Image: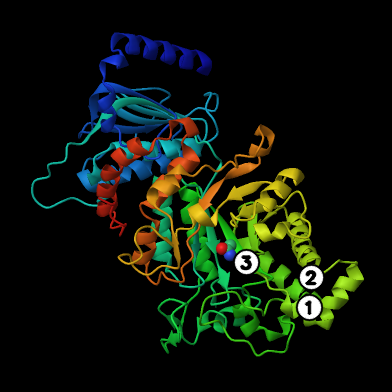
Amino acid sequence: MNRLFLSLFAFLVLLGGLAACPSSSVRAQDLSRYPIIPWPRHIEPHPGAFPLTEATRLAVSDPTDGDLRAVAEAWADRVRLASGLPLPLADAPVTDAEEGTVAFVLDPVAALEAEGYRLVVTPASITVTASTHAGLFYGAQTLRQLAPVAIERGGLVRGADATAWEIPAVIVEDAPRFGYRGLHLDVGRHFFPVSFIKKYLDLMALYKLNRFHWHLTEDQGWRIEIKRYPKLTEVGAYRKETLVGHYDNQPQRFDGTRYGGFYTQEEIREVVAYAQARHITIIPEIEMPGHSLAALAAYPELGCTPGPFEVATRWGVFEDIYCPKEETFTFLENVLTEVMDLFPGEYIHIGGDEAPKARWEQSAVAQEVIRREGLADEHALQSYFIRRIERFLNAHGRRLIGWDEIVEGGLSPTATLMFWRNWNEEALHQAAAQGNDLIMTPNQTLYFDHYQGDPTTEPLAIGGLTTLEEVYAYEPVPASYSEDEARHVLGAQANVWTEYMKTPQKVEYMVFPRLLALSEVVWTDRAARNWFAFRGRLPAHLDRLNVLTVTYRPLDR
Ligand code: ACM
């Protein structure tokens, strides 16, 4: 029998099974047996459960496919560590459900979307099917969430273990609404070690996010080793002290303590591989022309004035930015060449936000570029700057992402806009008119540096207020968009600016549980989103986050 017939046969057997055991006999309340976040496209509850026992086997459709084995083994390793069960991987390929087996089946002809999967759990077997490794990986995350919370503990408990190692019977057919499901981290304002970046990526994967926007350069610190320009990290990775308390507290006070750190290229490669194993693409951000004081402190000749410059010790927007000299473009191209060598993803983020034009207005060099290129003003010069960098990236097979300011003064239609200034609807109209792709990260709803409750009882934050429910209610496609325009909305992302987050614990507090709401915004079909149902599934996840030692913000009572 060929594959197609096999699939058809399996489908008929499944239909027969469903008729014999109608899902209508499982009441809607039983959905509480399936606390899955993000909620899947289609779920069919069934009675009974698959017991994980000493006899349970693991199997894959092609044991010679290392990536496929890795997906299956990553799931099985969690069970093994927490339960002590052996779950041996079968040598022989499986293409379908097999008694007593947890099978991961890569089936290129399965009619499943790129990141979609089908999960069938019966009392006799478990089968995850997908047409891509990513789809199988997401099926494995759903299977992880259906397992007892103990699956997260990474080891055996002492004494008697009361865990019932079983998975409730179910059929799930699932695929994401958006292809770009992102989370950002600013490591410039505060620096976070590789161990925390890995934990962050682990948690993203559990909630089926697939893009990590790593904000690597800032006024307050340059965080990525660039071999050709060692002073970027020798000088630019360290500031002499840091503002204490909120920026608005006057007079401002400083802690008098040198602060900094950076990632070596070796560490970056390690993180990139770690992300790849979790089907996460990293989008590195190298800011230009603004937010570049740390680079100017290292190489003052890149500024419009002689300097000297200092790595910033307070927050905000600074007037010293890169000067549009040939020397600056050479520098940035050399930096980007090393960045492209480290990060294999298609997209490179070049910032482009918050670049005051005061220095360019006073600079003979900048004015000469305006004259030479026939540009209208300094905004057009910013546009020239960005387009030139975009041409360089495109020539190397990469695509540019920038904050929505890059639309000002004209933008090439191939650039992707990261929309953050929700007060600036004009950028949305311009992008729609030009056909630019968009990633939605509106300040009002997806800035996870905002307070999530009463500021008088919350730990210090930058300001704002974005509750869990507001994140959940967010709709990425602008209401004014036509269906054609909506296709340019690649997805959404939460931004985590760390002026007021000094520790990994504080980052976790600001990100969780809001990240779980975001995961349904970007994965779950709009019509299937339901705040009350989500709220009902949350406690099971907070139990899981406890085991994973995530310092989340407790829910409001
Ligand atoms: C931004 O928040 N400046 C992108």
The residue that label 3 is drawn on is: 286
Q: Position of residue 198 (x, y in %)?
A: 41, 59
Q: Which residue is mark 2?
A: 378
In the rendered view, does 510 fall on the left or right side of 175?
Answer: left
- 234 versus 432 height, above or below: below
Query: Separation of disc 2 and disc 3 at Cα?
Result: 21 Å
Determine if the C-beta at disc 1 is less than 8 A from ligand 1.
Answer: no
Residue 454 position by quadrant:
bottom left
Q: Are marks 2 and 1 in contact (CB under 8 Å)?
A: yes
**10 relative to 399 in the view: left or right:** left
Res. 310 image quadrant:
bottom right
Q: Residue at x 54, y 76 (%)?
A: 221
- Nearer-the-camera pick, 45 or 535: 535
Q: What type is the residue that disc 3 sits on?
A: Ile
- Residue 205 appears in the rendering: no
Image: 372 above or below 515: below
- Viewer-side residue, 73 vs 262: 262
Q: Amino acid at mark 2?
A: Glu
Viewer-closest of 94 and 11: 11
Picture residue at 29% right of the left edge, 21% below the top: 46
Residue 361's disc is 1
The residue at label 2 has a CB less than 8 Å from ligand 1: no
Circle 1 SS class: helix
Q: Is residue 286 visible?
A: yes
Q: Earlier in the sequence, mark 1 or mark 3?
A: 3
Cα–Cα span, label 2 and label 1: 7 Å
CA gap, disc 1 and disc 3: 24 Å
Residue 333: x, y in percent? 73, 68
**In the image, the residue with mark 3 has its CB under 8 Å from the nearest atom of ligand 1:** no
